[in-house]
């Protein structure tokens, strides 16, 4: 079995594992006081981590050039090697979505880019709010004290509005915020690029329709074919 | 009668109904204490809702594949099925404007995109300010207490400036704010795309003018026609 | 004399008048207490206004279709008809710069767009700060109390950062702020469009260099010319 | 030796000097109380300045048209002539990175623009935070009092989020902030342009694949060659 085949086989299970992880992480952050639930969620989180680890090792094993693959996928390594970077691990969801979009040949101009950007931004807002709430809600002097506030903070941050009514005060919270802000820049870029491609397509269609009065290369082919027929006729005489 | 014909016929009446609704909604929000007026406006709102409902049912009835149309137009369903989502219903105005622009073949490069983006942003700012004022002005701890403040808040939000001198504090107000922020991202995207298309057109024109020293396909056609004449002359000798 | 000739003749005098006006307006706002200076500046402002009025009337008189020109230039009318909209009148500077750039065929891709956007933004920041300072510095509850603060406020507004340490509180000040914000959106758009055009040109150049293995239409022309020579040679035998 | 050769030879030493300067400047700002270190750093800073001065004079000496080079490189002059504009001098790093990227023909579409924009923004954030901390931390009424705060301030400023929890209050700090904001606008522009180029390439590839049913100029060449062979055959008969 080669790496491509493994990727195709593992695509859906990985996405499922990431979704399970998202649910478990959400419950861990939002219901931290429930003892029984926490034990169950702990098991779930370890199982998902094992799934990611198996995928990482399988990819490393099946790669044609192992050292190269190892060096080019530091993010995958971080995802499995640092169990305490929990929010980061959820970015696997984004990676899965990207891979699915690519393998399904989503139309990047006609709305595909917009859909990916929108879904990605929504995921980052939700996960960012979860992580920010987890990092900030019991810090001294914090303003983000409920998950609702954290969601609102994430929305005004990802759109780069930034009222400043809620701001992170811990180092961890500010690192998460930086990730949300960079997502915001990428969101603006993706929305703009998608609209620009759409306007450009419309413009090219208009120009093309207006510019070619007599036709194009197809006519040249026809004329040359006509020339050849005449030559042949002349040769036969 | 098929669906296309219904759409063409209903285009202007729907736009009119949406404008009436905008006026009625504005008066409802800004003059809430006037009893007699409120009764009249209530009737107007119900009549407009009936117009939208008739349009929705007619579209559903005339659609070639009813189930498909039903599934692909969830926004239209929300507009007529949830009478308490009043601000959302005003987005019909935006949809009408878009449809009109499309059917009138507005030039998307030479200012058309800018005009649509500007009008849409102005509409969202006005409707967003109305809805925000309605949601916030009597909430405890609110900072948006007058319609003027709400307008100013909507302008600084749609441009993603976000001073933070006025911020929503209710869940409803924050949902409306999220809509205004997303409009802002789309506005930046549309302005940029429009300018990019304009610059790109200018660049293409410059390149084209600079690159073709001897002419283009038109010359090729002429040369081949000349060849053909010589061949014919040679054949006649 | 036709309108085009008038435009070419009036280009530089109008720019000069606008610059004089900028200086006079700056002094009026920043040194309002000096009686003698104020009298001089008042005269200067009226002279510049007379220059603008003469230009407007000349354009109207020389236009081929006067009604059409009148309807299509409402901004020019506002500039001369409303003497109390002083800051607006300074936008003539922007218009002059645009016209000059166009008539001098500034390269829009290779930095021209960036230069126009940067100069325009700098002008709007300076004029916006002047107008904002004039509107706000003695309003009750205002935070913008010095010209330095107004400049800083204009810079953080035009870049859509919007800290909120200084915010306008008067209606006039907020209308000016809206103009600065819209300039900010346009600035982002122009910078992005300029960079996008530059990247696109580089990409097209790369693609073109990679794609044409044997040459282009020039080769076709050469081959057809060669064919013609052979035909002629064949005809002579 | 001509200027091009000098540039190629001085490329890496200049980058090294700028990196040494970055380290020395960082230590000067962050550990200002250490007397012995400060003396060493002072010497390092003067040596780096001497390196820059030698490069400037060599460029001026080797330039074909000295006056033209002098007038077109005011930034280089500022870098060496104003020893107290220390942060500005660090922009040499950015210039070196740009020159390296150009001379190594980095692929500007496939991630190169993104990488340059990201590295440049990271450098500006770090240097901006250093300079801002240096300018603000002991000013009366300042909110930016630690280097951590300055870093957080620079990140929220370069992404144009601008919460307003930390804002500069000194003139020097605001000038530095303006630089960081302009970098932010350029960052948004570069990210968007890079994404737009990527989407546009995908769109062109899709269109090209869909549009050419029979082939292109290559076929025309083949057909004309075929014509020529037939003519020659006809001539030989």
Image (cartoon, coloured by chain):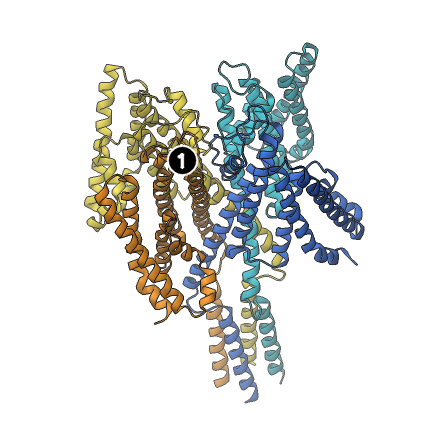
Chain colours: A cyan, B blue, C orange, D yellow
Give the residue drawn at x 60%, y 22%: A147
On the rendered structure, is C137 left or right of B14? Answer: left
Callout 1 secondary element: helix
Seen in the picture, residue C101 relative to B151 is either above or below; the reply is below
Residue C185 in the image: state x and y as whole percent.
46, 43
Residue C151 in the image: state x and y as whole percent.
34, 37
Give the residue drawn at x 56%, y 42%: B126
Residue A106 in sight here:
no
In-front residue for pair A206/C102: C102
| Image quarter in which the N terminus of chain B is found | bottom right
In-front residue for pair B144/B209: B144
Question: How many marks do you count on the picture?
Answer: 1
On the rendered structure, is B133 left or right of C131? Answer: right
Residue B214 in sight here:
yes
Q: Quadrant of residue A75?
A: top right
Q: Quadrant of residue A1?
A: top right
Residue A106 in the image: state x and y as whole percent.
64, 44
Seen in the picture, residue C211 relative to A14 is either above or below; the reply is below
Per the image, the residue denoted by label 1 is C156
In-front residue for pair A225/A146: A146
Is the residue marked by circle 1 packed among few (<14), some (14-19), or many (20+) residues within 10 Å? many
| Image quarter in which the C terminus of chain B is found | bottom right
Give the residue drawn at x 58%, y 73%: A224
Which residue is most to the bottom?
Answer: B237
Q: Chain of mark 1?
A: C
Residue A194 in the image: state x and y as whole percent.
56, 45
């Amino acid at each position: 079995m080669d790496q491509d085949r493994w990727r195709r086989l593992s695509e859906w299970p990985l996405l499922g594992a990431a979704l399970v992880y998202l649910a478990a992480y959400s419950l861990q952050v939002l219901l931290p006081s429930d003892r029984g639930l926490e034990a169950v969620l702990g098991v779930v989180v370890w199982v998902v981590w094992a799934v990611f680890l198996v995928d990482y090792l399988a990819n490393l094993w099946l790669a044609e050039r192992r050292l190269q693959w190892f060096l080019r996928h530091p993010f995958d390594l971080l995802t499995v090697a640092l169990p305490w970077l929990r929010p980061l691990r959820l970015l696997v969801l984004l990676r899965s979505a990207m891979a699915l979009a690519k393998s399904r040949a989503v139309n990047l101009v006609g709305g595909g880019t917009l859909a990916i950007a929108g879904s990605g931004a929504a995921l980052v807002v939700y996960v960012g709010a979860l992580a920010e709430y987890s990092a900030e809600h019991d810090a001294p002097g914090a303003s983000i004290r409920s998950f609702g506030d954290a969601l609102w903070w994430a929305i005004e941050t990802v759109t780069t509005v930034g009222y400043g009514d809620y701001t992170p005060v811990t180092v961890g919270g500010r690192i998460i915020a930086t990730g949300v802000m960079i997502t915001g820049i990428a969101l603006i870029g993706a929305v703009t690029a998608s609209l620009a491609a759409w306007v450009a397509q419309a413009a090219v269609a208009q120009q093309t329709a207006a510019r070619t009065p007599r036709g194009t290369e197809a006519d040249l082919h026809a004329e040359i074919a006509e020339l050849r027929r005449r030559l042949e006729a002349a040769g036969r005489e």
